[in-house]
Amino acid sequence: MDYGLLISKVERTLGGRKLTQQDVLYESLRRAILDGDIRHGSRLLATRALAEQLRIARNSVLYAYERLTDEGFITASRHGSIVNRVSGSGAATSATNPAGQAAQNRLSRRVRNLPRERTDPDDPTPFRPGVPALDEFPLAQWRASMERAWRAVEPGDLGYGNNAGHPALRRSIADYVRVSRGVRCTPEQVFITAGTQASLDLCACMLADPGDSVWVEDPGYHGAKAAFQAAGLQRVPIPVDAAGIAPTQDHWDRTPPRLLYITPSHQYPLGSVLSLERRWSIIENAVARGAWIIEDDYDSELRHSGPPLPSIQGLAADAPVIYLGTFSKTMFPALRMGFMVVPAHLVGEVDEALSEIVRQGRVAEQIALADFIDSGKYARHLRRMRRLYQQRRAALVAAIERYMGELVTISSDGGGMHLTMRLDAPLRDRDVSAATRKHGLHIAALSRFCQHPATDAARYNGFMLGYAGIAPEQADEWVARLAAVIRALLDGDGTRK
Amino acid sequence: MDYGLLISKVERTLGGRKLTQQDVLYESLRRAILDGDIRHGSRLLATRALAEQLRIARNSVLYAYERLTDEGFITASRHGSIVNRVSGSGAATSATNPAGQAAQNRLSRRVRNLPRERTDPDDPTPFRPGVPALDEFPLAQWRASMERAWRAVEPGDLGYGNNAGHPALRRSIADYVRVSRGVRCTPEQVFITAGTQASLDLCACMLADPGDSVWVEDPGYHGAKAAFQAAGLQRVPIPVDAAGIAPTQDHWDRTPPRLLYITPSHQYPLGSVLSLERRWSIIENAVARGAWIIEDDYDSELRHSGPPLPSIQGLAADAPVIYLGTFSKTMFPALRMGFMVVPAHLVGEVDEALSEIVRQGRVAEQIALADFIDSGKYARHLRRMRRLYQQRRAALVAAIERYMGELVTISSDGGGMHLTMRLDAPLRDRDVSAATRKHGLHIAALSRFCQHPATDAARYNGFMLGYAGIAPEQADEWVARLAAVIRALLDGDGTRK
């Protein structure tokens, strides 16, 4: 056994870390025993002999041997330090054979069957949806808010904190959504989460059991579908039209939901606004059937012109609605901060459930965000972003009309950070989408947001284009390149319908 | 209709916010229509008349009416502005009656049946377990790390970021756990999470389907039980003894698990260390049955004397183990940062699954933590805390021996932030626990960590006491008061066995 070799092998893998000699020796011996390089039953060199051979202090060797003894790797006997049998027998040996176990140790069905349709938000495409204009975020102001918040933090704030979030932030959010979104709530009804994805996980778990049915808009938001799938729920796709989600009486009678997930103020991805009439109809039917409504109001603050329709939550104070908001679009995604507004009579139960299944904290971030809202910086930033996105949308629309107006029809839409357009050319949206990805210009195919992309391809043959990241002066260039990709496809390479 | 009264009512609820007159008027009218104070079919006062009556600009009234028209609350006609029927009919009316719907709109069964056993980590008791000595955290150093990190953040860092976490932090953690915990991994195997509770949620979802069985230690960690319950899994309690979790062959044969949750380095709550022999047996059996092992190494870094046993993950490189670590105990809970180490051959699948079901971000915090680890501040803090907790444990043990030595037997235990002790007096631990809560000295009953508290009460009649927050000079006082509470119970108020 060449101990020097063993050690140099381990030293390489630990590269750069300042370890004591005794730690390196211990680690080297441990791995050698585990890997079978030192056989069980064999005897380690005596401590003095090994110390001399390696030119290290004998105490270091004693330490390493003691530790290996403590941990059951070797046994000290009159005959010296004998290596124990620790590398397992039979089945355990197959643990080192990933191929052999791959058949059994798989991920869960719910995860293997996840709908794979998410657009990568960090895809380096100018048209990526869902990510705000990060360059335009007032980073210096936010840094200052964070520094102020950290200075205010005391040791007692470093614990788990309130299950529902920091009281100051809950109050700021309640004030804000009451006025801007017509949400009827007290601060006690506001529960802080790590963003909409976390809110959806919590709603799915709190409001439905495995096997329960959840209505989702079709086409609809992939993140919600993934959350419901992960929670073991059955998704029922409900069609969407120009007035939002459009369930028929048949849907209500034959596949009544336990949970409805809707984006009434700006349907994702089509952009339609749920009509007041449908809002009432959904509330009435949900109440009659004991169903829950999850109202995802994800970018209502970014409506470009005029105020948006008030929230469903605000229409009927005690309706079975959980209202979801997020700061990922209005501030920035990396903040990981969102919230749920729950019905007043459920506050106690929800608080108790959350105390078991989530852990809070992040007090500095919550104080900073409350300060950002209360000081008016948030509202000022939103006003600026609304104007900015309005201009960017207009520039993108003009460029599309100019370079590819005859190929597509742009949907009218009140705001947000993306637009949708129908493809009028004889191509399939997913073929175009795949081609654009190769050119670093990826645009998402509308059909991929559908439950059955193949059969819905005719109905939703089009695209979703984010414009938050496209400065007006860049729009022409990007769209011209996009148009070139589409025309190349049209000019024939076998992808025609 | 007294418009002035309506408005003053709304103004009160908006108290303190700077709203324009037109917003207040809009909001007042909207609520009045929704609440039925203004009946459907009725006609609003003409804009000019209302402006005069309220002494506000006519433009403000025009704005409010236009917005109400846009949103479908009123219809402009030749006869004036007529209020639409928007307050719903039939079923919707019952939406304003929480009592009427309470029977149907309940939380899910999985949440209603959650095991309610969590000790409130912010319970103002000196003996609270699970929360480190927050006063001793080097807050100024951490503030400096955060400020540096925020200065390094660029707009591009504000997006969703890498699903798995920031590469710098993954590397720091991989280096750290390789050396200190014998975990075999590359940075690619490390996935950053929002703490152990989030890791458990992800493991439950990724590794098991609703109805699958999960083995939990009994007594065991409530947070894990809650996560598995929320994920729809069936819990199978497995007894624990002085050498850790002790499944019998019968357990393996009759109730084979899909998932095993274990705390091998410091069993929660008893503190026993899983023997090397049992570690191998568990790996062998899990491999043979295609089961997953979740190794929660929650406070292994805080072992007081000598190094802990290396991780199970490190025993067999390709074993089906997910290793969980957290910074809640070694840094502070509010940080909300933990990690999972997954087997090398699963990295791609896990990464893909996480891209659908979680959202990352929090780049500044991750950079700051990587910096804290790499600069040696983390290791220095840990060394200090180990000594501190060792002293605090010794002081608490001495105080217990002094004031109530004959009432309890303290378990030997290698470290962490809490100790357990058996109650030798003829009382039930939960009665004592309830009594201590009344005195602001709450100590958790061991039986409450058991699957069947009533039947296990004899076997686990004792307490779990956190000492992280008790300075040595305070130990006597707190324990003397605790002893007084127990003696008062013994002196008879009907709670004897």
Image (cartoon, coloured by chain):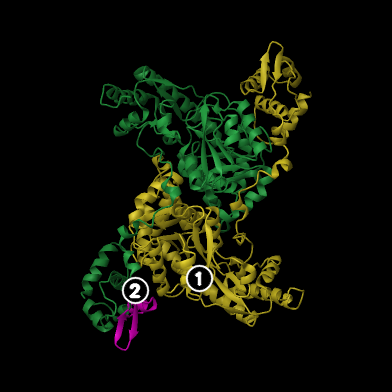
Chain colours: A green, B yellow
Q: Nearer the viewer, residue B197 or A207?
A: A207
Which chain hosts label 2?
A
The residue positioned farthest toward the top in the image shown: B78
Q: Nearer the viewer, residue B215 or B342?
A: B215
Number of dots carrying numbers: 2
Q: Magenta region: which residues?
A: A62-83
Q: Residue at x 64, y 83 (%)?
A: B406
Q: Residues within 10 Å of mark 2 (few under 14, many from 20)?
A: many
Q: Amino acid at mark 2?
A: Val
Q: Amino acid at mark 1?
A: Leu
Secondary structure state at the residue bearing disc 1:
helix
Residue A297 magenta: no
Compared with residue B487, is residue B20 higher up or lower down, i.e. above or below?
above
Q: Residues within 10 Å of mark 1 (few under 14, many from 20)?
A: some
Which residue in the protein does label 2 denote?
A86
Q: Quadrant of residue B345?
A: bottom left
Which residue in the protein does label 1 denote?
B388
Q: Taking the image as drawn, is residue A168 in sight? A: yes
- State the quadrant of the C terminus of chain A: top left
Which chain hosts label 1?
B
